[in-house]
Amino acid sequence: MSSLTLQHIGIMIAQNPIVRHVSLTLASGEIGCLLGPSGCGKTTLLRGIAGFQALHEGQILLDDQVVSSSTTTQPPEQRGIGMVFQDFALFPHLTVAENIAFGMRKASSTERRLRVDELLTRIGLPGYQGRYPHELSGGQQQRIALARALAPRPRILLLDEPFSSLDAELREKLALEVRQLLKQEGITALLVTHDQQEAFAMADKAGMMYQGELLQWETPYQLYHTPRHQLVADFIGHGVLMQGTVNASGSLASPLGMIENSALLQVAAGTPVSFLVRPDDIVMDPRSRLRGTIKSRGFRGAHNLYTVALPSGIEILTLSPSHEQLEVGSKIGLRPEFDHLVVFAADYCELPGSWQLPEAQTP
């Protein structure tokens, strides 16, 4: 197992800054995930770690040894880093066993065979040694691609949107299986994805990138419940940012009514704020005086996700068990119930290009 440390990484392509001042640490055996919209620099950062992209500033360390900086670069083949790509990149003319053993050229034939058999058992495909990639499903091909990357026992494994070509149900299932396999192998790994459920299923640490910067790097739980920037709050989960004002008694006057929470104790009276409202913060309550109109309904398996318009015209989201199906256009009672109220300064500019993002105030 190896640790990974990035210190103030900057990467430029054609004189354009793609990655800016990124710092993060993964301890040995930890699995990390980089989230963010397309074009935010996730894959470029991954290529920098692998050694395929030169650094403009900062340095990358494996086990406290510098492998990349603005002045020195260790060749990719000397870093002991494995990669898994979204297109699988299996060799169509090689069998499953030959694909997995491809990176083990220095091992003996016996060592290669034993390692292939071990990994096929671990990924749930024993006996598939003689098959070819075209005889496998998409999920099976991705398992083989992962086994091939793990076969040489890399120090670090990098995964670039490895499940993006698979359907949603298979993605989440495979993410859990991959996490278990990485933990069994004791591999430190960094995953790039735009799928939050995939990230939450796999990661010990997660972060969101935006326009080349890493806005926050913490556990998935902290990223979801205590986002430190409005962009993180807006991207992670189905959240809505609403406006309100803290009054003299320390309560928040808002379109949801008066809200009381310990997070508001840090806010001066009269301060206008933005606050985050997620579906699990809103409870359907027929006795509530706050009413809303259902605008749409989305099936989510055990739950339906409802978009509800308040009298003010603001739309929020709420969940309800799917066996209690409510019709679009019907009126419902709503009650806010915040366990984690996240509050931001109301004057934050949401337009791209603002790098000094405000810190959130949390309990």
Image: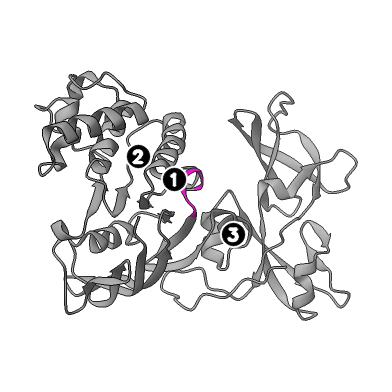
Query: Image check: 284 left or right of 20?
Result: right
Q: Which mark is residue 195?
A: 1
Disc tally is 3
Q: Considering only order in the chain, which callout, 1 or 3, is on the residue closer to the N terminus?
A: 1
Foreground of the two, 270 or 95: 95
**348 in relation to 44, above or below:** below
Foreground of the two, 206 or 189: 189
- In reply to whether residue 201 is colored magenta, the answer given is yes
What is the secondary structure assignment of the residue under circle 3? helix
Q: Which quadrant holds residue 285?
A: top right
Tell me which residue sits at (57%, 68%) in the image.
228
Depth check, mark 3 against mark 2: the one in front is 3
Question: Where does the C terminus fall, quadrant-wise?
Answer: bottom right
Q: Considering only order in the chain, which callout, 2 or 3, is on the residue closer to the N terminus?
A: 2
The dominant secondary structure in magenta is: helix
Magenta-drawn segment: 200-204
What is the secondary structure assignment of the residue under circle 1? loop
Callout 3–callout 1 Cβ contact below 8 Å: no
Tell me which residue sits at (37%, 71%) in the image.
22
- In reply to whether residue 152 is colored magenta, the answer given is no
Q: Which mark is residue 222?
A: 3
Residue 19, given in percent of the width and then of the height, sits at: 31, 69
Q: Which residue is mark 2?
A: 164
Which amino acid, mark 2? Ser
Depth check, mark 3 against mark 1: the one in front is 3
The CA span between labels 3 and 2 is: 25 Å
Query: Image check: 20 left or right of 113?
Result: right
**105 in relation to 357, above or below:** above
Question: Where does the N terminus fall, quadrant-wise?
Answer: bottom left
